[in-house]
Image: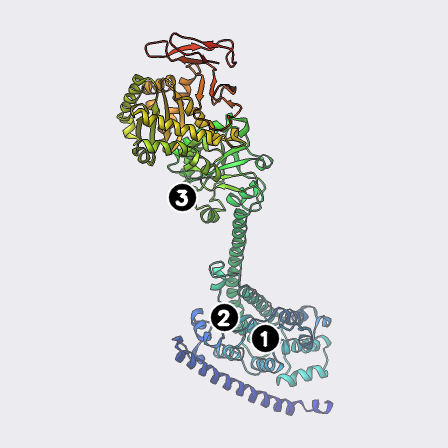
């Protein structure tokens, strides 16, 4: 070798000739292959408007034109391999070589052999050494300029057709590292030692060039090119890694599938070509142009990666919210998933009475009725919920239930905020004060079927949904359906079935009446025919009132006293049998239906009584004095009926006022045709009484106010005040012509 180096001129000349011939052969072969590929792409139906390779300048054409010219030399079915291991090794080699320019720390240099020995996983990318040398030769064995840049990149892509985009870039980087690290090490070693040695002569022999000094500016430019290229390749690997994750779809991460991986790979290889020719006559402005273009490409890549990251985080957030909706671990977590960011510490939920934030500890122990709505046309719902709020507030057993308004607004304008404050002022319950579209809007739509119309979701303290929409239940049944779960809906819907089955038998029109939306039915009777006739006339007058017509309130009434005595007897007999059937249960006293039947049976021998229902929901049943006073006083409460206050609410409000002014009525009922054992005792059905009903034979009575003697007046009835022994079995009342009857 020493003798050979004494004649560098002739040896260099021969080496140069050999390298030139090799480069020419490679370029010719590459150009031929590219032309063939382009022709094949067109004939294969891709219909691409290709530009001849020698005429395409990547620095002054649109990106989509470059994409069209390289798409035909990529196998879309290429199998992904582990590129990370090879990239980590090669990038460290390249970075170490680049760092020499600044530090001349030769200890950081790694030989190319590390690439072969380190990449050991079976699935790892391991390109053949022959392939690497062929690509390395294309990078270093011919000049690089704007006129042949595209042709050179296409030549390398041709060799890498069967690889994924990230594998193409990493293989090109590996080929580049074969010469790059060694070339810089030899050059910088010479600069450091400042004397002729074999290393420099070997370097000159390899490149068939004269010794050139590496200027600081050229070194900085190449370092910048290398650094940006490594960033670009790392980004390509990241994109391909996401693509390889089959759990992501274009719908999940649209930015990922729109990212131009082909263009990023194209510019990475073009940059490597520019770096590989760092000791050639590549003009400074061409190098600068590559650096400038890489800056643009990296900016786009980083924007793509940022958007993908944002979409990925949004996807993970959405998955978390859907999971919580389906399997919640508590009410607080459910509220977070429905409304707030995942990492929120304080939930912006205000107690509208105290105007203070509700603490997490308080929320954890409550069951909620989530009133979810927009800001428009929710007045009816607010009024209905106020009745529920009043009921659960007054009842200590219902203190663990709270109403929470969750406004759903996409654009919180100043006008929307003003509307919010106005609606909020009419709500005495909890309110979400979060002026952004709720974060769980998508699962709200898909899991709870929210379409923009108000819903009321019943949720327990564990976050379990007991009813996805209880509004209809509240509109029809009111507080009687509390706590508005699915079982409660089933309970109340069947609650008065025993009554309607018998009512439909008497008059088939009743079945049509109860099916009317916003329809009310008065079913009444009594022993006083005059009372029942007057009551019916008053209902007819109410039906004709302008307010009733304006609010489209549907009212019908039926007088049981008008049907023949046989039909009446059969009706009461069937109600009696329904009662006896339910008493056969061991826990019959827990059956609320039994109490309703008992209440109706208590009306049988009364002067007058009325049952009022909204559809199938019987919300009121009462004796003559109270009911007559309510309908007679219609002028006092008719103005309370409006679009926001329904007929039943106005009726019930006035009823509550009247009931407090009328003496309480004794309750009694009789059982007939008993064929089995008689229950020991029943409680009075009047909620304000609570006394046990004493038994006289099979007649049950409880006197907590007034009772009526049937034979004392011309109407057959006289009120008798309860005596000092009310509720006992030792007081009797006798009237002329009557049988002795027990009157507690």
Lateral position of residue 232 relative to residue 66, left or right: right
Q: Which mark is residue 262?
A: 2
- The quadrant of the rendering that contains the N terminus is bottom right
Q: In this view, does 314 lie above or below 740?
A: below
The residue where tag 3 is placed is 452
Asked whether the viewer can see residue 427, the reply is: no
CA–CA distance between discs 3 and 2?
43 Å
Which of the two labelled residues, at mark 3 and mark 2, occupies the earlier sequence position?
A: 2
| Quadrant of residue 271 within the rendered picture | bottom right
Callout 3: SS = loop
Q: Which of marks 2 and 1 is nearer the N terminus?
A: 1
Of labels 3 and 1, the one closer to you = 3
Residue 171 circle label = 1
Q: Are marks 2 and 1 in contact (CB under 8 Å)?
A: no
Q: Relative to 131, does residue 703 appear above or below in the rendering? A: above
What residue is at 62 percent from the left and 89 percent from the top? Answer: 15
Instruction: Give the crowd class for mark 2: few <14, some 14-19, many >=20 residues within 10 Å.
Output: many
**Residue at 40% across, 42% down:** 453
Which residue is drawn at the image coordinates 62% and 81% (left, top)? 129
Query: Residues under labels 3 and 1: Cα distance?
Result: 54 Å
Query: Depth check: 491 or 157 in front?
Result: 491
In the image, residue 512 above or below residue 272: above
Are the residues tagged 3 and 2 within 8 Å (C-beta)? no
Q: Where's residue 376, x and y in %?
A: 38, 38
Which residue is nearer to you in this view: 472 or 487? 487
Q: Where is residue 419 drawn, in percent x and y?
A: 41, 35
Q: Which of 140 and 196 is in front in this view?
A: 140
Q: How many labels does the image show?
A: 3
Position of residue 715 measured from the top left corner of the image (x, y, whole percent): 33, 12
Q: How far is disc 2 from disc 1 in space, using C-alphas?
A: 15 Å
Q: Earlier in the sequence, mark 3 or mark 1?
A: 1
In the rendering, which numbered label is found on residue 485? none
């Amino acid at each position: 070798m020493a003798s050979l180096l004494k004649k560098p001129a002739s040896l260099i000349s021969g080496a140069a000739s050999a390298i030139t011939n090799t480069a020419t052969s490679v370029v010719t072969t590459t150009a031929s292959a590219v032309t063939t590929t382009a022709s094949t792409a067109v004939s294969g139906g891709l219909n691409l408007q290709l530009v001849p390779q020698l005429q395409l300048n990547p620095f002054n054409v649109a990106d989509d034109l470059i994409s069209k010219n390289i798409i035909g030399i990529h196998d879309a079915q290429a199998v992904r391999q582990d590129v990370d291991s090879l990239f980590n090794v090669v990038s460290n080699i390249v970075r170490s070589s680049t760092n020499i320019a600044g530090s001349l720390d030769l200890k950081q240099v790694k030989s190319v052999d590390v690439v072969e020995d380190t990449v050991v996983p079976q699935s790892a990318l391991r390109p053949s050494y022959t392939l690497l040398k062929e690509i390395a030769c294309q990078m270093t064995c011919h000049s690089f300029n704007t006129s042949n840049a595209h042709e050179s990149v296409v030549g390398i892509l041709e060799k890498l057709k069967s690889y994924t985009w990230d594998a193409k870039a990493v293989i090109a980087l590996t080929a580049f590292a074969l010469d790059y690290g060694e070339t810089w090490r030899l050059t910088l070693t010479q600069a450091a030692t400042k004397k002729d040695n074999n290393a420099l002569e070997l370097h000159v022999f390899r490149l068939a060039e004269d010794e050139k000094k590496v200027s600081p500016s050229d070194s900085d430019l190449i370092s910048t090119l290398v650094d940006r290229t490594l960033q670009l390749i790392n980004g390509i690997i990241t994109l391909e890694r996401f693509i390889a994750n089959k759990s992501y779809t274009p719908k999940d991460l649209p930015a990922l599938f729109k990212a131009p991986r082909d263009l990023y790979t194209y510019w990475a290889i073009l940059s490597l070509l520019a770096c590989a020719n760092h000791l050639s006559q590549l003009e400074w402005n061409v190098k600068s142009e590559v650096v400038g273009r890489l800056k643009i490409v990296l900016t786009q890549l980083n924007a793509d990666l940022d958007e993908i990251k944002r979409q990925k985080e949004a996807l993970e957030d959405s998955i978390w919210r859907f999971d919580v909706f389906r399997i919640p671990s508590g009410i607080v977590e459910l509220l977070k998933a429905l409304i707030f960011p995942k990492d929120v510490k304080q939930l912006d939920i205000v107690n509208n009475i105290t105007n203070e934030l509700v603490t997490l500890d308080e929320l954890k122990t409550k069951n909620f009725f989530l009133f979810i709505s927009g800001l428009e046309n929710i007045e009816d719902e607010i009024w209905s919920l106020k009745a529920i709020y009043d009921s659960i507030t007054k009842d200590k057993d219902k203190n663990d239930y709270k109403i929470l308004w969750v406004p759903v607004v996409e654009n919180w304008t100043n006008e929307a905020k003003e509307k919010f404050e106005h609606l909020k002022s009419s709500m005495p319950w909890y309110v979400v004060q979060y002026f952004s579209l709720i974060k769980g809007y998508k699962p709200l739509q898909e899991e709870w079927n929210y379409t923009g119309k108000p819903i009321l979701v019943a949720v327990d303290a564990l976050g379990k949904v007991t009813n996805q929409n209880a509004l209809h239940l509240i509109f029809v049944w009111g507080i009687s359906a509390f706590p508005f779960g699915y079982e409660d809906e089933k309970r109340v819907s069947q609650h008065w079935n025993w009554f309607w089955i018998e009512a439909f038998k008497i008059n088939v029109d009743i079945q049509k009446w109860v099916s009317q939306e916003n329809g009310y039915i008065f079913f009444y009777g009594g022993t006083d025919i005059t009372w029942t006739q007057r009551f019916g006339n008053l209902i007819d007058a109410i039906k004709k009132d302008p307010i009733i017509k304006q609010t489209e309130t549907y009212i019908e009434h039926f007088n049981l006293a008008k049907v023949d005595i046989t039909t009446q007897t059969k009706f009461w007999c069937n109600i009696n049998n329904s009662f006896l059937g339910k008493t056969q249960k061991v826990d019959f006293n827990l059956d609320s239906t039994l109490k309703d039947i008992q209440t109706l049976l208590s009306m049988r021998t009364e002067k007058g009584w009325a049952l009022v229902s909204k559809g199938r929901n019987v919300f009121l049943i009462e004796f003559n004095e109270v009911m007559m006073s309510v309908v007679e006083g219609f002028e006092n409460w008719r103005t309370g009926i409006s679009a926001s206050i329904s007929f039943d609410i106005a009726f019930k409000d006035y009823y509550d006022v009247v009931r407090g002014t009328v003496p309480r009525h004794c309750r009694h009922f009789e059982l007939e045709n008993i064929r089995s054992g008689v229950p020991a005792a029943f409680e009075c059905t009047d909620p304000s009484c609570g006394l046990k009903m004493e038994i006289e034979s099979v007649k049950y009575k409880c006197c907590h106010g007034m009772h009526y003697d049937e034979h004392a007046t011309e109407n057959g009835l006289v009120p008798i005040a309860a005596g000092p022994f009310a509720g006992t079995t030792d007081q009797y009342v006798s009237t002329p012509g009557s049988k002795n009857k027990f009157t507690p």
